[in-house]
Image (spheres, grey):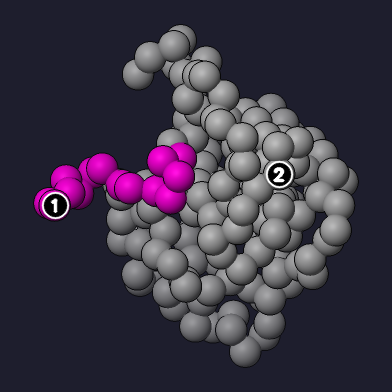
Amino acid sequence: MKREKSMAVFEHALDFHSLDDAVAYARLCLTAGYDRTGNWDLAQTCRHMTDWLRAPLVGPPPTPWPMKLPMAMIRVTLGPGILRRFLAERKLPAGMGTLKSTVHPPESDATAAVNEFAATAARFAAHTGPWLRPSPLVDKLDREQALALQLVHCMHHFGRLKPRSPQPSAEPGAAAAGGGR
């Protein structure tokens, strides 16, 4: 089946239009239970997403010094094209890799991680000041780009967690978009 370039297919049909959608999905996984199709549990996913939601606010997670020069080169050469592709396709490639400091150990109870993710998402959404560099791969972004990149990142990781109960009747994004698109 041929797929249009602007239409991305996500696991479990995730299509977040706000950080509230991502928080609601994390809370659904917490309350209903979930099955994993990836390597991380809900707590690991929420902690990773929290790390990257903080990046535009306080700066990116620590980057090992041997990686700083290659990352800087990517940021000024390939970074703009990579960003355009991620935002246009609304998808990140599987197995892309991340900074080791953003990979967390499994936790038996994800409640604290979900709550921290929700609080950080609210802080990100309420932020009105300038953004710092949100990623080692891309430079400064405007508010719309920063949010869009975070949503794509959330869909990428939360798409590997499937709630055990049915999705809420309104698909993610419906409330934020006034019930439609």
Q: CA distance from mark 1 to mark 2?
A: 32 Å
Outermost bottom residue: 66
| Residue at left offset 42%, top offset 58% | 92
- On the image, numbered disc 1 is attached to which residue? 1
**Predominant secondary structure in magenta?**
loop
The C terminus lies in quadrant: top left
Instruction: In the rendered view, tell whether residue 175 sits above or below residue 32.
Output: above
Nearest the eye: 39 or 127: 39
Q: Tag 1: Cα neighbours inside 10 Å, few (<14), some, or many (≥20)?
A: few
Left or right of 142? Residue 52 is right
| Residue at left offset 52%, top offset 19% | 169
| Residue at left offset 31%, top offset 47% | 8
Percent across and percent down for residue 150 are 54, 46
Outermost left residue: 2
Nearest the eye: 137 or 169: 169
Left or right of 89? Residue 50 is right
Look at label 2 and name its amino acid.
Gly
Percent across and percent down for residue 58 are 73, 52
Q: Which residues are magenta?
A: 1-14
| Residue at left offset 13%, top offset 52% | 1
Percent across and percent down for residue 48 are 69, 58
Nearest the eye: 133 or 106: 106
Q: Secondary structure at mark 2?
A: loop
Left or right of 169? Residue 99 is right
Instruction: In the rendered view, tell whether residue 77 sits above or below residue 142.
Output: below
Look at label 1 and name its amino acid.
Met
Percent across and percent down for residue 25 are 62, 36
Q: Which numbered disc flags the more N-terminal residue, 1 or 2?
A: 1
Nearest the eye: 30 or 113: 30
- On the image, numbered disc 2 is attached to which residue? 33
